[in-house]
Image: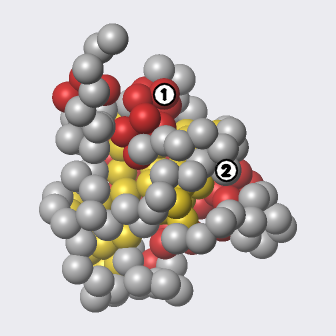
Amino acid sequence: MKVLCVAGPSDSGKTTVVASLAERLRERGTVATVKHLTHEPDVDTEGKDTARHRAGGAVHTVGLTDEGTWFATGRNRTLGDVLDEFARRYDYAILEGFSDSDVPKVALGDRAVDPPVVARAATADDLDLDEVVRLINQLPSYDPEHSPDRDDRSDE
């Protein structure tokens, strides 16, 4: 599975980029998205980000809060937990937010994001989506066993 994060400040066009990438990538394989949430979710309400992800072509959408709340099951989950599950089922995972993750990122606006950054643009309109799709396909595949965003756990 190829994983890419879209990070930037509010109203920079992150959701637009995620939905556009999901639409383009669904022609090449299955797409799942994960949106970083800072508050309790408003799940799949028309016009909201998660509904836009799904309308863009994502067959599975997950929202996570900073505290680990996951709106689909209510079970605490980390980004690594979600990506580990997705890796078994999807060809692509596009993340929105998670600017401090170790996942390769497209950075929008002037927000500082942790590396690695594979593309940067002032706004969503300034981003060459064809180039981003090309970059995604050049990224190494996600490896659940060696994910930097996976919590250290013992195999019990």
Relative to 60, residue 133 above or below: below
For residue 135, side relative to residue 13 (left or right) = left
User: In the image, residue 144 lies at what x, y percent?
Assistant: 31, 26
The residue singled out by tag 2 in the image is: 71
Q: Nearer the viewer, residue 128 or 156?
A: 156
Q: Quadrant of the C terminus?
A: top left
Q: Which residue is denoted by mark 1 in the rendering?
A: 85
Query: In front of the other: label 1 or label 2?
Result: 2
Quarter of the image for residue 75 reads top right
Q: Image check: 90 left or right of 145? A: right
Report the residue at 23% width, 33% height from top.
152
Q: Residue at x 49, y 41 (%)?
A: 77
Specify whether 89 is left or right of 60. left
| Mark 1, secondary structure of its residue | helix
Residue lying furthest top: 156
Q: Give the camera-side residue of 119 and 15.
A: 15
Q: Residue furthest right?
A: 46
> Which residue is at 65% across, 66% downward?
40
Q: Position of residue 1 (x, y in %)?
A: 39, 31
Can you say whether 152 is above or below 9 in the image?
above
Element on which disc 2 rests: loop
**Callout 1 touching callout 2 (CB < 8 Å):** no
- Residue at position x 51%, y 78% from top? 13
Please indicate, yes or no, whether residue 23 appears anywhere in the rendered image.
Answer: no
Count residues near mark 1 (Cα–Cα under 10 Å), then give few for <14, some for 14-19, many for 20+.
Answer: few
Amino acid at pointer 2: Phe
- Label at residue 95: none
User: Is residue 13 shown left or right of residue 113?
Assistant: right
Displayed quadrant of residue 87: top left
Q: CA distance from mark 1 to mark 2?
A: 16 Å
Front residue of 33/153: it is 153
